[in-house]
Structures are given as structure tokens and as C-alpha cells.
């Protein structure tokens, strides 16, 4: 197509770093059979058709820097798989703090935590103006877990600017009927909520649950314990910020069960921060159930993965499907790509069905 997909990013952290590195990595390696993409082509759009035109953060080491520098600034610690990210000419602006900064983050070494910038914050009208002036079509929300007010602030800016909102964190906006109606009435396509990684704990857990169900196993109990070393896990040490995250992750698995196993028998959620792991995430998953004759069975699995590239593998498709919807004049929540790439979509579908729906959407056989 030759057309660029102009995106704005809120939160220039590890996830943004992996996504932006990926744009240039796949551009440099195009035609070489490079792995790691669920869809190389989405309606004519390739990964390198994505262009960052605006960005916001609140960290002193990122605000005022070119996006190409900010993605490698502390406390970012994800793998550098594409060091040659060219200057973008886009400077990171000072975002609205609101509840985007947890107080306990002040108590850790600067290279591990956020350092709040002493700059004038962009107000709502400033964000709207930047979105309009840059021609941004999509805003990606990468704010920290628990940033409920801040997430809604940027969603409101998108409504005022006619910009699509892709919600990568677990504040329920796209899956909230009132918010969904606002975007639909404005004819703006949106994707959310809470990014479901390419091969992360949620998709693996869902796959195992589906396997048990498909093979006639009665599931009695299950847990998923996650820990890692990035700022996401440090931020989530404040348990009060975890309410929607736990709901999002639990419902992603629970929605597949055709029966209630009881709240005491399912535990899913972040558990701890281990600094030396950096952007590595480790998940322990266990399922207990009964096979033929009510004989017990249990399965345990350990997943060890670099967290942010795992997230970017899904976001790269969410962006391109959102752009397709804009091209086609579709407004409101995009059910197919949300179910495929998000933990808490407006409608949950089994993953095999969500994949088929996305393929149909890309071919133009499904509206959204």
C-alpha cells in the first residue's frame, strides 16, 4: 500500500521499546524468512509501515529525548535485538501524571524505577492538539497497571481527536459498554483491553485448559504464578493497583470453563519482583483434574520468556487491524482482533476461533 500507519504512544517503556525495535528489525530483514510474526501481511500493511509520530512519558530520562533514544533509557531493560533505530524527529513529551506513578516506586534505585520529571504536564487540550497536528491515527496505551485515571484521560483525548485507542493495559475501557458506545458513536475503531502476549502465561494457560476440556478432563483447581524483574512487576508490588489486572487474567482463563470451579480453586496473578531477571518473566502454571474413572491428573509447566517482545508480537497485529478498520470506516470495538490479542476483550472467544475471526476480518469477510 505504501501508506504509513501513524501511531502515538503513551508510556515509552519496555513494551514500546520492543515494538519500535521490531518495526526496524523486520524492515531490515524483510524477505529473509525471519520468524516471530503471527501475520506478516495484514491487508497490505507490513510491520515497517508503522510510524511513531508522538509519544508521552513521565520519566526524567525520557522526556525531551528523541523516541529512538528514550526507548533505550533507564529503567528500560528489555533485550536489544535491533540497536540501529534511526532518529525519528519525535521528542517524548511530558505526560499527565495523575495515578500513573505509584508512591512506593520512589523507594528503589533509579536504574530500577521511574524518576518523575519536573516538567510541565500536557493537559487534555495539549494532547488533543498534538494528536491532530501530527496526524496520529492510533494511540497505544502502555501506561503502568493501576493507572485508571490516566488511561481514561488519554482515551478521552482520543475521542476528542478522532483517534483510535489500543488499550494494552488492564483498565477496562474497550470492554466497558459505556466507553465502547462513545467510540462507536464517533465512528472510531478501538482494540482492548490488556495485551495478551504472543506466547505468554495467559495464552499458554488457556491452551492447557482447552486441552483438558477437549479430552474430557474435569478441572478441579488451577493456578498461575508470575514474577519478573521489570518496572511492571515492581509497580505491581502495590497490591491495590492489581484489582483489574487480576480480574483480566483470571477471566481470560475462567471464561473457557463451562462450569464454576469456585473462587478458592483458581488463583491467577503477579506474585513478585526479582530485579536481576530484568525483562524476563517466569510463570508457573498448574492444573489439577480428573480423567477416566475420576482418577487424578495434574500438570505443571514453567514458562521463561522475555516479556516485552512477547507483548509486541501481538501489538503489531492489533495496530494493523485497527488501521484496516479505519480504512473501512468501521467504528467501535473490534471484536476479532481484541479477542485474539487481548486478555479482557469485549467478547471472549476460544483462541482458535478468534484467530479464524481475525483472518476473516483481514479478508473483509467480517465487519469487526
Image (spheres, helix red, strand yellow):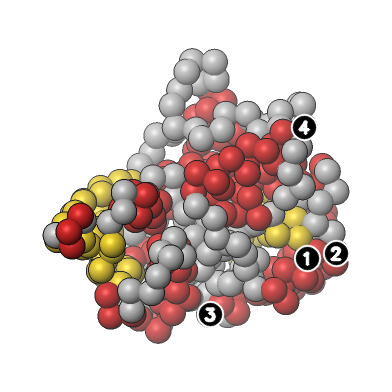
Q: Residues within 10 Å of mark 3 (few under 14, many from 20)?
A: some
Circle nearer the N terminus (3, 2): 3
SS state under label 4: loop
Residue at the spot of label 4: 3
User: Which mark, residue 183?
Assistant: 1
Q: Are marks 3 and 1 in contact (CB under 8 Å)?
A: no
Q: Above or below — where is 4 with respect to 58? A: above
Q: Above or below — where is 250 with respect to 284? A: below
Query: Residue 331 versus residue 9: which sits nearer the camera?
Result: 331
Q: Are marks 2 and 1 in contact (CB under 8 Å)?
A: yes
The outermost residue toward the top is: 32
| 276 with respect to 321 (left or right) | left
Q: Residues within 10 Å of mark 1 (few under 14, many from 20)?
A: many
What residue appears at the point 80 percent right and 64 percent down from the top-left corner?
184
Circle nearer the N terminus (3, 1): 3
| 240 with respect to 47 (left or right) | left
SS state under label 2: loop
Q: Position of residue 265 (x, y in %)?
A: 27, 75
Q: Above or below — where is 211 with respect to 46? A: below
| Cα separation between marks 3 and 1 | 23 Å
Name the image quarter holding the N terminus: top right
User: Which mark, residue 99?
Assistant: 3
User: Which mark, residue 186?
Assistant: 2
Q: Position of residue 326 (x, y in %)?
A: 79, 47
Circle nearer the N terminus (4, 2): 4
Circle nearer the N terminus (4, 1): 4
Q: Position of residue 286 (x, y in %)?
A: 22, 60
- Mark 4 or mark 2: which is in front? 2
| Cα separation between marks 4 and 2 | 24 Å
Amino acid at each position: 500500500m505504501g501508506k504509513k500507519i501513524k501511531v502515538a504512544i503513551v508510556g515509552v517503556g519496555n513494551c514500546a521499546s520492543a515494538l519500535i525495535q521490531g518495526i526496524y528489525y523486520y524492515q531490515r530483514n524483510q524477505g529473509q524468512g525471519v520468524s516471530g510474526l503471527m501475520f506478516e501481511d495484514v491487508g497490505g500493511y507490513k510491520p515497517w509501515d508503522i510510524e511513531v509520530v508522538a509519544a508521552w512519558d513521565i520519566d526524567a530520562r525520557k522526556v525531551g529525548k528523541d523516541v529512538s533514544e528514550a526507548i533505550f533509557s533507564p529503567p528500560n531493560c528489555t533485550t536489544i535485538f535491533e540497536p540501529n533505530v534511526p532518529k525519528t524527529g519525535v521528542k517524548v513529551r511530558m505526560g499527565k501524571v495523575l495515578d500513573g506513578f505509584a508512591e512506593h516506586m520512589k523507594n528503589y534505585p533509579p536504574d530500577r524505577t521511574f524518576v518523575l520529571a519536573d516538567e510541565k504536564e500536557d493537559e487534555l487540550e495539549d494532547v488533543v492538539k498534538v494528536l491532530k497536528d501530527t496526524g496520529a491515527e492510533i494511540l497505544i496505551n502502555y501506561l503502568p497497571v493501576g493507572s485508571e485515571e490516566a488511561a481514561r484521560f488519554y482515551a478521552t483525548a482520543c475521542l476528542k481527536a478522532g483517534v483510535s485507542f489500543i488499550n494494552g493495559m488492564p483498565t477496562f475501557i474497550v470492554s466497558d459498554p459505556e466507553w465502547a458506545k462513545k467510540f462507536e458513536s464517533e465512528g472510531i475503531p478501538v482494540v482492548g483491553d490488556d495485551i495478551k502476549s504472543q506466547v505468554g502465561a495467559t495464552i499458554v494457560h488457556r491452551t492447557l485448559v482447552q486441552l483438558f476440556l477437549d479430552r474430557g478432563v474435569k478441572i478441579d483447581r488451577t493456578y498461575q504464578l508470575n514474577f519478573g524483574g521489570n518496572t511492571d512487576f515492581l509497580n505491581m508490588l502495590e497490591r491495590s493497583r492489581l484489582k483489574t489486572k487480576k480480574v483480566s487474567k483470571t477471566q481470560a482463563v475462567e471464561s473457557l470453563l463451562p462450569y464454576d470451579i469456585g473462587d478458592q480453586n483458581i488463583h491467577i496473578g503477579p506474585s513478585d519482583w526479582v530485579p536481576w531477571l530484568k525483562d524476563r518473566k517466569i510463570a508457573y502454571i498448574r492444573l489439577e483434574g480428573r480423567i477416566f474413572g475420576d482418577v487424578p491428573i495434574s500438570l505443571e509447566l514453567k514458562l521463561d520468556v522475555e516479556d516485552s517482545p512477547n507483548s509486541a508480537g501481538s501489538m503489531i497485529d492489533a495496530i494493523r487491524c485497527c488501521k484496516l478498520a479505519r480504512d473501512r470506516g468501521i467504528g467501535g470495538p473490534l471484536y476479532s482482533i481484541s479477542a485474539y490479542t487481548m486478555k479482557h476483550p469485549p467478547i471472549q472467544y476460544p483462541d482458535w476461533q478468534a484467530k479464524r475471526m481475525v483472518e476473516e476480518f483481514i479478508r473483509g469477510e467480517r465487519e469487526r
